Amino acid sequence: MDFQANKDLIFQNVAQIVEKENRPKDSVNIIAVTKYVDCETAKKLVATGIKHIGENRVDKFLEKYHALKEENLTWHLIGSLQRRKVKDVINYVDYFHALDSVKLAQEINKRADHVINCFLQVNISKEESKHGFLVEELDSVLLELAALENICLVGLMTMAPFEATHQELDQIFSEARQLQINLQAKQLKNMPFSDLSMGMSRDYPEAIANGSTYVRIGTAFFK
Ligand SMILES: *Cc1c(COP(=O)(O)O)cnc(C)c1O
């Protein structure tokens, strides 16, 4: 694996799309998802100039965190989180991308020793296999989350179906963006909703074209 070449290619692709879409330079943060590799390999990737690391499981997150904590990285927990594991991990997390229930939010609020940046996961495509709130539930969910002082809702996260076409991706990501813009306009306390976490190796071009500010890329770094 030529990590430097893979990294350069991904960063160049992202920069090109950002420019084509007339978005500000550096408006998209690239999270390297290291769940496929061990700590040594992740270290080699980080040496190419990675600033954001993402892991989807608590045990793997903690392994990488302890191996790489000297590297001045921003740490993203991107996968669904079981309530009983919150206390083990939440205070190491800079951004949690998969807030998908009020009970989980309450547990995070209880265990956090500082304000945790969270993305609300929304199930735009309504796939049954996907986690996340349905759009229709959001108003009542936000009322319940408003009381949780240790939770800052920085934005929305969504995932598109694996087999989605270009057109379907555009539709899902633009719907998420519209929702994010509407929520941001509400100017709710502890709920800036300024960001969008969407786009993976296979669909980050469509996600960036629709305003994504955090792309979560794994496979493309490790081929
Ligand atoms: C694995 C994973 C990614 C990265 O997916 P790739 O297709 O490998 O780029 C992004 N988001 C989540 C939640 C993941 O679990």
Image (spheres, rainbow, N blue to C red):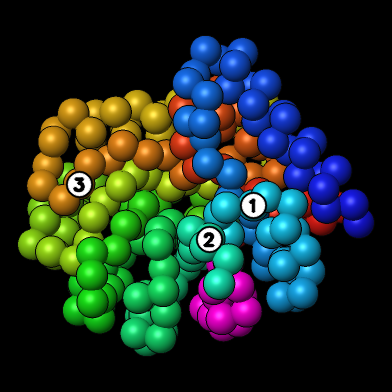
Residue type highlighted by circle 2: Leu
Specify whether 59 is left or right of 162: left
Determine which of the numbered discs, if any, sits on residue 139 in the image: none
Choose between 107 and 152: the one closer to the eye: 152
Is label 2 within 8 A of ligand 1 (CB to nearest ligand atom)?
no
Which residue in the structure is indicated by mark 1? 50
Residue at the spot 23% in from the left edge and 70% down from the top edge:
114
The local secondary structure at tag 1 comes to: loop
Q: Residue 143 magenta-drawn?
A: no
Q: Is residue 16 above or below residue 158?
A: above
Say what secondary structure mark 2 lies in: loop
Query: Could you say where residue 121 lies in the image, as x and y percent from the top left?
Result: 39, 52
Residue 123 x, y percent position in the rendering:
43, 48
Which of the 4 image quadrants contains residue 181?
top left
| Residue position marked by numbered label 2 in the rendering | 73
Distance Cα–Cα, label 1 vs label 2: 8 Å
Residue under the image location 24 percent in, 29 percent down: 182
* Of callouts 3 and 2, the N-terminal one: 2
Of labels 1 and 3, earlier in sequence is 1
Question: What's the magenta region?
Answer: 55-69
Left or right placement of residue 85 versus residue 170 in this view: left
Q: Amino acid at mark 1?
A: Ile
The secondary structure type at the circle numbered 3 is loop
Query: Which residue occupies the foreground of this view, 121 or 204?
Result: 204
Q: Nearer the viewer, residue 72 or 125?
A: 72
Task: Report which residue position mark 3 lands on.
Answer: 191
Whether residue 54 is visible: no
From what the image shows, is residue 178 above or below residue 187? Answer: above
